[in-house]
Image: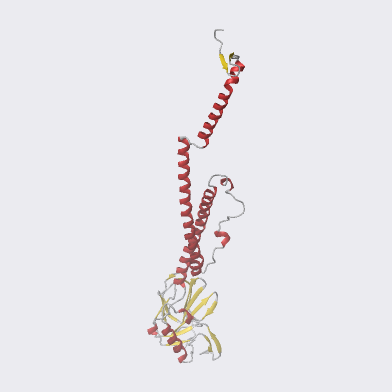
Amino acid sequence: MIGSKYTYNSENISFEKQDSSIRARFKRLFPFITLSFIFATIMVVTFFFFIDSPKEKALKRDKNEILSQYQILNNELNTIKKELTDLQYRDDNIYRTIFEADPISKDIRQAGFGGTDKYENLRHLDAKEIVANTSQNFDIISKQLYIQSKSFDQVAKLAKRKKDMMASIPAILPISSNQIKRIGHYGMRIHPIYKIPKMHEGMDFTATTGTSVYATGNGTVIEIKKSYGGYGNQVMIEHGFGYETRYAHLKLIKVQKGQKIKRGDLIGTVGSTGLSTGPHLHYEVIKKNRHVNPINYYFEDISPEEYNEMIHHSLQYGGQSLD
C-alpha cells in the first residue's frame, strides 16, 4: 500500500507493516522525548545553579567589594575604640583627678548598650556578623564620643575654674619681705593691751609707717572700715571659692568698696590705727567663715627656705603680736 511503512522482522524472516497511529508514533518517540527533557533539565539546572549570568557576576563582585569595605571599616572602628578607651582612661584618672572631679561611671560611658539586640534584623544577611558588628561598633563609638565630648567640656570649665581659683587664693605676702621688720604669729598669745590670753586670728607684720600693702589674691573689696578702736582702718576682700582676707590698722586706704582687685594691687599703707602698740599690718585669711593660719598661704611668694626663716623670725620675739 502506497505510503505504508514496513519493518523487517528477523525472527520470522518477513516484513511487517508498522502501526502508523498517533499513539504508536508517540510510543516510539517517547524515549527520545524523555531523554531530551532530562538533558534539557540538566542543562537548565547547570546553567541556573553553577554558571552565573553577567548580571549575577556583577552583583557578586559588588557584594564582595562591599563586604571588603565593611571589613576595613570594622578594623578601623576597632582601632578607634582602643584609642577612645585610652582617652577615657586618661580623662578619668588624670584630667578629672587634677581638677578634683569624679570619674564618669562605666554605665554612662557604655552609653546604654546591652539588653535587647537591636541588630537582630541584620543577622539574617550573608556575612551577618561583620555587618552587625560594624553597625554596632559605629553606634557605640558615636555615643561614647558624644559622652567624651561632654566630659571634655566639663573638664575645660573645671580648668578655667581652677585657673580662676589659683589666681584668687591668697598666695603672697601682703608686704614685701624686705620691708618686714618683725612678725607676730597666729594663735593664742597674751594681748599686748589687755594683758590676757586671747586668740590672735591673723599675723602681724611690723614695718615702717606708709609701707605699701598689697592684695594677696584676685577678688572684690566687700568692706572698708575707718575706726579709732579695734582693727582701726581696715579692708576686707572676698576672693571667691570660700576665701576672704582682712588688712587692718592701715594708715591710708587706697581702694573703694565694690572695687575689683588683682593679686599684687596696692590697697593701702601700713599704719597704727585702732588698738595697736606700733605701726604694723594685721593680716587675716578666712576660709569658709573660719580663720586659718596665713603662714600656709605664701606659696607664690617665698621659697621653702624663706618659709622656714619666716617661722623662725616669727618665734624670735616669742611671736608676740602688736594688737
Q: Nearer the viewer, residue 41 or 293?
A: 41
Residue at 50% x, 53% y is 142
In this picture, is 60 found above or below 101? above
Nearer to me, 16 or 185: 16
Image x and y of residue 213, in percent: 41, 79
Please name whichever residue, 124 or 99, is drawn nearer the observer in this view of the structure: 124
* Residue 227 point in image, percent of width and height: 49, 80
168 to 195, vertically: above or below: above
Outermost residue toward the top in this view: 1
Q: Which residue lies furthest to the left in this view?
A: 178
Residue 239 as seen in the image, left or right of residue 177 = right
Quadrant for the N terminus, please. top right
Q: Which residue is drawn at 54% across and 33% down?
A: 45
**Residue 264 percent location from the top left of the image:** 40, 75
Front in this rendered view, residue 148 or 249: 148
Q: Where is residue 173 in the image (x, y as percent from the top left)?
A: 43, 80
Q: In the picture shown, does residue 93 fall above or below 13? A: below
